[in-house]
Image (spheres, rainbow, N blue to C red):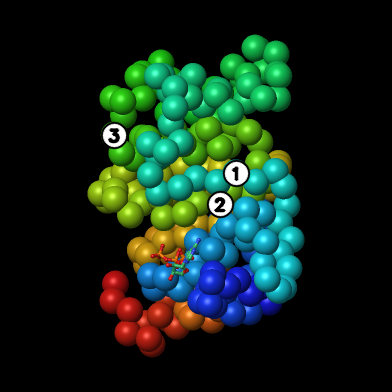
Amino acid sequence: MDVHVTFGNKRVLRGASLAVVRGSLHVLLGPNGCGKSTLLRVLGRQLAPAAGSARTDGPISFVFQNPDHQIVMPTVAADVAFGLGRYTLPATAVRAQVAAALATVGLAAVAQRPTHTLSGGQRQRCAIAGALAQAPKVLLLDELTTFLDGGDQRGVLEAVRACVGGPDQVTALWVTHRLEELAYADAASFMDGGRVQVTGSPAEVAEHMRRLGARW
Ligand SMILES: Nc1ncnc2c1ncn2[C@@H]1O[C@H](COP(=O)(O)OP(=O)(O)OP(=O)(O)O)[C@@H](O)[C@H]1O
């Protein structure tokens, strides 16, 4: 709430406030440089605001634009299991969590494939499965589809949709430039100038952006 972040003498967040409903997929739109990623870092507890406060359910998992920064193991299943090692789970529990995460993102059939043979969209879904296997309450997803074509874009969005809600009430905050992705959202916000300008239903936010001259 009312989050302020300054880098040097540049005020990047100027009183940004965002409330996301638990168990929902919330889409955050806004022009380049308006502060979306910075707000995500504050919500993910990677960055302390100069003023204001953020409260986010935990555990929190991040997924970024370039899956190559997150995929580190030679096969899909090994990669999804990688982050689980630190919890020292028994092998059967690791296998079960990996299988469940891969099923959720639609990659069960390629569990044993080398990660370098995956398409861009499959690589993003592999990164999402890795995040999901760690049983987060909140997924913070920063421009995952920027470099994907339509088919891969839809596959990644459907994977995120499948992660959201459920018995654990997983919440996803999805940052994007692509207005058509509002179709997958439960709710949305539009950010500009370091502040969240409007929050509402996808239709309300789309209408706000149309009034601003955004093209579909
Ligand atoms: N660590 C940093 N040091 C200095 N300036 C930064 C830092 N991180 C971000 N900025 C600046 O803060 C502003 C907001 O950046 P941010 O990445 O949050 O915007 P964004 O809305 O996510 O943009 P984009 O859509 O292009 O990813 C930009 O002008 C950026 O250059």
Using the numbered discs, state the Cα–Cα distance from disc 1 to disc 2 in whole angstroms: 6 Å
Query: Could you tell me the amino acid type at mark 2?
Result: Leu
Q: Position of residue 62 (x, y in %)?
A: 55, 46
Q: Name the residue beneath numbered marker 3.
A: 119
63 left or right of 21?
Answer: left
The mark lying in front, picked from 3 and 1, is: 1
Query: Could you tell me the amino acid type at mark 1?
Result: Ser
Return the mark for residue 140: 2
Q: Name the residue beneath numbered marker 1.
A: 61
The answer to whether residue 24 shows anywhere in this view is no
**Front one among 116 and 206:** 116
Q: Earlier in the sequence, mark 1 or mark 2?
A: 1
**Front one among 213 and 114:** 114
Q: Position of residue 66 (x, y in %)?
A: 38, 44
Q: Earlier in the sequence, mark 3 or mark 1?
A: 1
109 left or right of 216?
Answer: right
Q: Secondary structure at mark 1?
A: strand
Question: Local crowd at mark 1 within 10 Å, few (<14), some, or many (≥20)?
Answer: many
